[in-house]
Amino acid sequence: MNADRQYLCVKKLKGRDIVRVAAKHNLRELQAELGAGSHIDHTRIGLNQVMAGPDKAADVAAYADGLMRDAGVGNMRRDAVRGIEIIVSLPASSTIDRTAFFTDSLAWAQRFFAVPVLSAVIHLDEAAPHCHVLLLPLVDGRMVGSDLVGNKTRLQAMQASYFEQVGRRYGLTRPKARKRFNQAVRDKAASIAVSAIQSSPELLDRHGVESALLVLVRHDPEPLLAALGLSMPLPAKSSKSFVGIMTKPCKPEKPIGFKQQAKPIGFAHAVPSNNQTLSCVGFAPESPHLPEHESCPDAAITRCRDDLPSEYWDSELGEYRLPDEQPRQTRLG
C-alpha cells in the first residue's frame, strides 16, 4: 500500500484575462518564471505533457471566449469567476504511474464538475509532478464559477469524491485537518527542532528536512540572510521605457454630449480610430485590487504555489497554510 497522501486543490480564477494568464503559466510561456532562482527546471520543460486543449495560451483563451459567445454569455463583471483550476499532485518520491493517475484525475474532474475542459497540462519540471486542469464554469448558458466551487461543505464533498474515485484506487490516504497551535507551542516546537539539529547535524541530510526548511525560509528569508551577513536581493527593474509607456496605444475618450449628433468637446467631428497612438496620461481607468497573478499578465507568478509540499495544503479551508500562519477569516464561495 502506498503511503502517499491525497493532494487536490481548486481555485477560482478572476480577471478579464485570467484564463490566458493561467494558460501561459501552465504552458510555460511566461519567460519571467524561467530565469535564475525559479523553481522550474528549464531543462525538463520538454517532459511536460499537454493532456487536453490547445498548446498555446492564446488559443486556450480563444476557445473559452468562443464557448461563452456561442452560449450567449454577455458582459461580465470585472471580478466575475472566469475559470476554475484544479491541481492534483504527487510527492516527488512517489512510484505511482503518473500518466495513469493524472488521466484518471482529469476524467474525475470532467465527471464531477460537468463543464468544458479548456486545458490540462502535466508538469514534470518541478520538484513534485502535478497536473493543472482549467475548466470553464459554463452551465446552461450561465457562468456559475462561485456556485461550482461552493462553500466548505462542497469542498469537503469534492475531496471525498476524489478520494473514492481516484485516490483510494492508487493507495493514497486522505490528508487530515491540520491542528491549530498557539504561539507558545510553536515556540517550543522550534526550540526542539533547533536543539535536535545542533546535537545531530546529520539530521539535515535526512529526506524531507531540506525541503521543509526551505518552505520556512521562503516564507520570511530576511532574518536568515541578516544572520548570515547577506542582503535581500533588489527587485528587478522594469524594462519598459518612458517613451514606450507614454506612447502606449489606448482607446480615445468617448464624446461628451447626450444627442446622437453631439460633437466631442475640443475635437473635430471625425473621431480618431482605436489604433491611433495617444498619450494615456490622465486617462488611466481605475482598477480594483486583484491578486498578484491577475494584476499583470506578464509578471512572474506562482499562482498555485505548487513548489510547496502537499502537507501544507489545508483541504478543510481550501488554502495553503505555513506553520506560523493563522487561518484567514474569509467565507468560501
Image (cartoon, rainbow, N blue to C red):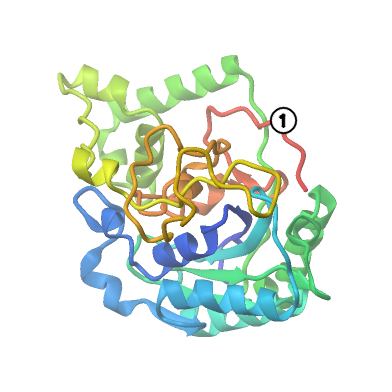
Q: Which residue is mark 1?
A: 329
Q: Viewer-proximal residue, 277 or 230?
A: 277
Q: Is residue 119 left or right of residue 75?
A: left
What percent of the width, then of the height, locates residue 258? Answer: 70, 44
Q: Secondary structure at mark 1?
A: loop
Q: Which quadrant: the N terminus?
A: bottom right
Q: Viewer-proximal residue, 129 or 19?
A: 19
What percent of the width, then of the height, locates residue 130? Answer: 47, 67
Q: Viewer-proximal residue, 147 or 283?
A: 283
Q: Quadrant of residue 226?
A: top left
Q: Residue at x 78, y 48 (%)?
A: 333
Number of numbered callouts drawn: 1
> Three-letter amino acid code at disc 1?
Gln
Name the outermost residue toward the left: 229
Q: Residue at x 39, y 49 (%)?
A: 208
Q: Is residue 256 left or right of residue 159?
A: left
Q: Residue at x 37, y 24 (%)?
A: 194
Can residue 169 be seen by looking at this rendering? no
